[in-house]
Image (cartoon, rainbow, N blue to C red):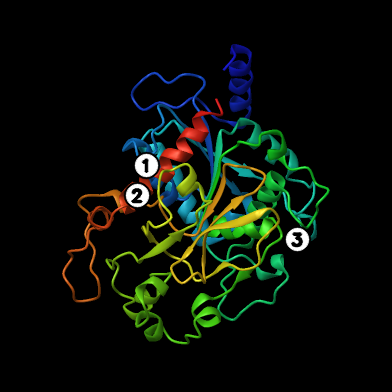
Amino acid sequence: MKKKNLTWIFLLLIGLGLTAPSRGEDISLGAPVIVMTHPTLFQVQNIVELYEKNIMPLKSLVLMGIYHEDELANGEEAKAYQEAFTYVQQNRLTWVQFRKITGRVDAKDLFQENLWTAQFKEIFSAASGILFTGGMDIPPTLYNQGISLLSEPTTPARSYFEISFLFHLLGGSRNPAFIPFLAGRRDFPLLAICLGAQSLNVAAGGSLIQDIPSEVYGQKTVEEVLAADPDRVHSGIYLEKLFPNDTELMMTFHRIRLGADSVFVRKMGFSRGDRPFVATAHHQAIAELGANLHVTATSLDGKIVEAVEHRLFANVLGIQFHPERHTLYRKGLFQRRQTGAPLDFNPLSFLRANPPTLAFHHAIWKWFSEQVSAQK
């Protein structure tokens, strides 16, 4: 990177309230900036552990967690953010910073230049990559549907600003004349996880299945879901509903099918016949695809979209599963398969015992880190 560009980025980071990171060694001014939405304690811990364990193989990093000011009006959300702020401060994680998005935008104005546009541009200009994380359901009005009795759109402020940000980045069918930010940086890496993948699809003009068990499989009870083929169970919430007082229940995993034209096959070295297990935690899924998106992984039965990629921007990937959870990579973490069972399930051991599952998880973060590094 040219020196004048380093100086410009340094001034911009100061303007954003960011500083260069440090984890015990000198880190250059050119450390890549990864922007992450919804920087709660758990989400921040995910990136900290991926980075510290070199699963995200970057020599240096600035993590910029962004959130909307109205999220702090939600008691549970505010608590989760305060826990993250305290965790970062107590552990002196100077390479982790936070940025608040301010102002309110109506739903009718999300898919055009609006009050947030300048803030989005400023953040994007400093970023080397963006992560959109998991969370609660999107208000169905944003994809022109009534609200299902099973939908839980409890964080609308978050949905509004993240979907508008994604639209600014990628464009979509809601406003085809809009020139997205990535038109000027076509190789920019964007990884959208679970809710993030759904938000990506809605921002591009697509829609969602509001409840997989009832709408796709015709299931009406928790017991019916848990009695189904494990590859058709997409969330651990059903086990939690059956045993609500047990906080040590195992994660839910199922296998996925990789598309021949997917980044997993083209760039990460996997074959179309590989069937990696993924950690899964969603009751909604992509339905009608948004503009310029195509499906590159599905559930084994082909009924649930597990990954989408963008036809115009090569490094935009939306995944419905969770390779970011730091609890996947802990040797000493043990969970139980059901209430009353021994604590004998270790997620990392499970990943290792079912190849190419562990390699698949690592490959996603290696790919993302390489694309981030290439932005410097």
Q: Is residue 157 above or below residue 221?
A: above
Q: Amino acid at mark 3?
A: Ala
The answer to which of marks 3 and 1 sits earlier in the sequence is 1
Q: Amino acid at mark 1?
A: Leu
Q: Amino acid at mark 2?
A: His
Q: Residue at x 40, y 85 (%)?
A: 224
**Label 3 belongs to which residue?**
107
The answer to which of marks 2 and 1 sits earlier in the sequence is 1
Q: Residue at x 36, y 44 (%)?
A: 362
Please, what secondary structure does the residue beneath circle 3 have? helix
Q: Is residue 222 above or below residue 115?
A: below
Q: Quadrant of the C terminus?
A: top right
Please, what secondary structure does the residue beneath circle 1 have? helix
Asked which quadrant contains residue 272, the reply is bottom left
What is the spatial separation of the Cα atoms under label 2 and label 3, in whole angstroms? 34 Å
**Label 1 belongs to which residue?**
50
Q: Quadrant of the N terminus?
A: top right
Q: How many marks?
A: 3
Specify whether 185 is left or right of 369: right
Give the number of the mark in front: 3 or 1. Answer: 1
